[in-house]
Image (tube, grey):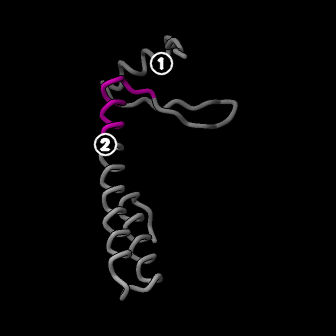
Amino acid sequence: MTTKLTAEQREALKACAGQPVRVADENTSEVFYLLNEDAFAHLRSLQADCDDEFKEKLRELITEGIRSSELSAEKVFSDLRAEVNRLTGDQP
């Protein structure tokens, strides 16, 4: 589905000189951002890179856990949770 820009949105995009435009839905109070296709593609590629890094680190941690009978499940879970937090930017 493609939605057409309103005159107000078009002016806001021009005024913001390529930066995302914050748009609020008056009915729901949800906030959205308008950005051009190149910026969206760049954000998607950053997400893909992060996803790939996350998957590789997860594989490494699982392999390490399988190979090591000396690691406790608690230690493995703790390390895994710390890595997930690091990659997602969440605080422990």
Main SS of the magenta part reads helix
Where disc 1 sits, the SS reads helix
- In the image, 61 versus 7, the foreground residue is 61
| Residue to which mark 1 is pinned | 9
Disc 2, SS? helix
Q: Position of residue 86 (x, y in %)?
A: 36, 64
Q: Name the residue at 36% across, 55% down.
A: 55
The residue at which mark 2 appears reads as 46
Residue shown at 39% from the left, 21% from the top: 13
Mark 2 nearby-residue class (10 Å; few <14, some 14–19, many ≥20): few
Under mark 2, the amino acid is Leu
Which residue lies at the image location 36% right of the left edge and 88% below the top edge? 70
Choose the circle earlier in sequence order: 1 or 2. Answer: 1
Where is residue 34 drawn, in percent x and y? 44, 27
Q: Residue 17, percent across and down?
A: 30, 24
What residue span does the magenta drawing correspond to? 34-45
